[in-house]
Image (cartoon, rainbow, N blue to C red):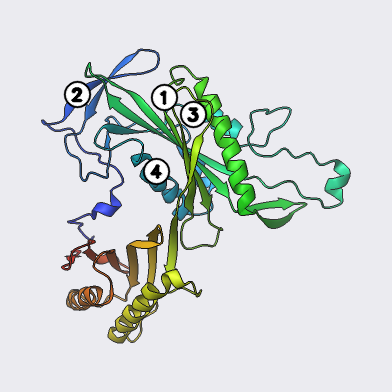
Amino acid sequence: MKRMWWIPISLLLLTGCVPSETDEEAEVVNEKEEVETAIIPSMQLDDQYYRTLLPYKESATRGKIVNRLNSRYDIVETENGLLRLSQKQFSPDDYYFQEGQKITDEDATSWLQRTSTDNPAGLNAADKRTEEQKKAGERAPAEILAHITEQNYLVKTDEGKIRLGGISIGLALNTMYYSSEGGMSYEQEIPQAQIGKEGKRMADEIVKRLREKEGLADVPIVVGLFKQNAGNAMVPGTYFASGAAPGGKQTVANWNAVNEAYVLFPTSGSDERYRDIDTAFRNFKQDVEIYFSNFTSVIGTGFYQNNELKELKIEIPIQFFGAAEVIGFTQYVTGLVAEHFPENVLVEVSVTSTNGPEALVLKKAGETKPFVHIYE
């Protein structure tokens, strides 16, 4: 069994640790003025990561996400992307993270369904077809809302107690609706304009419902609209809009466009925004294939913000023949990373085999010398 000696920071979403002597105990006060004791970890891995109160509390809606989203890529990105949006409103220097505790399992089950006489709280469009229309093959309107992600941000008061200081809500919206009728499966593409309009409508309704819960009337609420990718996509979708409802407000104001994108390399399109990196990646891939004549594939995923590449993750699967070969290949790849990719981009290369991870090469943005780890 391989021993993992080092874990890249990019794999650590939030700081979680075993309580130590330097950790701090604090009293957490909820909306009912009930007091609990929690541990605040002393270590913060990076200024972009929130410290998480211990013991860790899971969201009531956590288990629903697997069945509601199309891929594991979207499952991860709905949370990671919402964390990025939240940092603009709730600074990691001042706030602590906790999974959402305000939207109950009952709330989520009801809200994610279609609205109907039996379920008036449903946020997806009602199915008003008659039996004749169903027999004629008319399809139900697409369900746009796929999942609701909630994150809570807690802050320390002047009295040294921890209280809820903000809520972030991520609405995962379908760009492609998959369903079946009469035993026949079908898919329906949903226009971006409809996704945006319905997403904002749902956001206002959810904010209104949260305001009605005890203790949430004056809590700032951030909402992000996430468009999930098609089921066969190899990269996640992204948030495309965000807004905030200040304390006391019933609706989301000041909607802003979020310019983020995940791009698979090598690309199959001709978008000028990705051409330079695509060329660099193809040259990198070609050099890798020179080393392994029986090589299968090199796949890269680029993360863009405001049309600038911020991060490039590359996966290289190899046939494992021995430790010496892995070392030699890793040294070779490390040189290629420095040769082909810009200094201002974080590049992470994972070398794997059927035995599991073999090596990791990490070059942080602004640095010329990569960090290299070979698993034992």
Q: Earlier in the sequence, mark 3 or mark 1?
A: 3
Residue, x 33% and y 64% (percent of image)?
313
* Residue 328 placement (x, y as % from top left): 18, 78
Q: Amino acid at mark 1?
A: Val
Q: Marks 1 and 4, Cα distance to the nearest angstrom?
A: 17 Å
Q: Earlier in the sequence, mark 2 or mark 4?
A: 2
Q: Amino acid at mark 4?
A: Leu
Residue position marked by numbered label 1 in the rendering: 219
Q: Earlier in the sequence, mark 1 or mark 4?
A: 4
Residue position marked by numbered label 4 in the rendering: 85
Q: Amino acid at mark 3?
A: Ile
Q: Marks 2 and 4, Cα distance to the nearest angstrom?
A: 28 Å
Q: Marks 3 and 1, Cα distance to the nearest angstrom?
A: 14 Å
Residue 22, quarter of the rendered image: top left
Residue position marked by numbered label 3 in the rendering: 103
Say few, some or many: other residues with alpha carbon within 10 Å of mark 3 (under 14 / 14 to 19 / 20 or more).
Answer: many
Residue, x 46% and y 20% (percent of image)?
217
The secondary element bearing badge 2 is classed as: strand
Labels 3, 1: front one: 1
The secondary element bearing badge 3 is classed as: loop
**Which residue is most to the left?**
21
The secondary element bearing badge 1 is classed as: loop
Residue 368, quarter of the rendered image: bottom left
* Residue 48 placement (x, y as % from top left): 27, 45
Q: Amino acid at mark 2?
A: Glu
Residue 366, quarter of the rendered image: bottom left
Q: Is residue 155 left or right of residue 105?
A: left
176 or 240, which is in the foreground? 240
